[in-house]
Amino acid sequence: QVQLVESGGGLVQAGGSLRLSCAGSGRTFSSYVMGWFRQAPGKERQFVAATRWSDGNTYYADSVKGRFTISGDNAKNTVYLQMNSLKPEDTAVYYCAASQRVYYSGPYYRPQGYDYWGQGTQVTVSS
């Protein structure tokens, strides 16, 4: 059974940084896309970033390009989201997700394509 466990959320001032971690277990993720999504109160779940384990290709939402970096540690089965220059509008619950379907047929930015989800971690950016 696949499990994804996020950590690293918290409260930070605007302009600050946080690093989220997503530890995966239950299988090898070599043919998976790992994604980060976020959901603010009253809003739909929104794509943030994704990466393919096999080749390290990365994808970002326009709103986070240049500020966020997704990376993976194969040995630890862990995906990270380094978030710099945080803004109040980045405030949300951040979710890690994994999908084999998206790996083979995309698209990486649709949450409906992901099969496995973590429990979420709250990120709050104060102004």
Image (tube, helix red, strand yellow):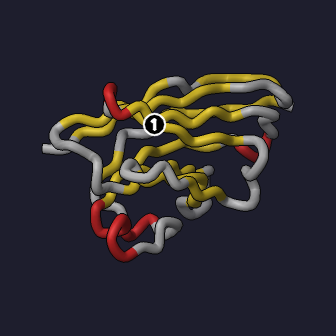
Q: Relative to 39, does residue 13 appear above or below in the rendering?
A: above
Q: Secondary structure at mark 1?
A: strand
Q: Relative to 100, does residue 64 appear above or below in the rendering?
A: above
The spot of residue 88 in percent (x, y) is: 79, 40
Q: Left or right: where does residue 22 sit relative to residue 69?
A: left
Q: Residue at x 32, y 55 (%)?
A: 32
Q: Left or right: where does residue 118 sit relative to residue 7?
A: left
Q: Residue at x 57, y 42 (%)?
A: 70
Quarter of the image holding residue 28?
Answer: top left
Inspect this view and state whether residue 35 appears: no
Q: Left or right: where does residue 28 sit relative to residue 97?
A: left
Quarter of the image holding residue 82?
Answer: top right
Q: Residue at x 37, y 51 (%)?
A: 54
Q: Residue at x 67, y 23 (%)?
A: 11
Residue at mark 1: 72
Q: Relative to 75, does residue 94 appear above or below in the rendering?
A: below
Q: Residue furthest front?
A: 55
Front one among 106 and 120:
106
Front one among 63 and 93:
63
**Tally of numbered discs:** 1
The spot of residue 41 in percent (x, y) is: 60, 51
Q: Amino acid at mark 1?
A: Gly
Q: Quadrant of the N terminus?
A: top left
The spot of residue 6 in percent (x, y) is: 42, 32
Front one among 56 and 4:
56
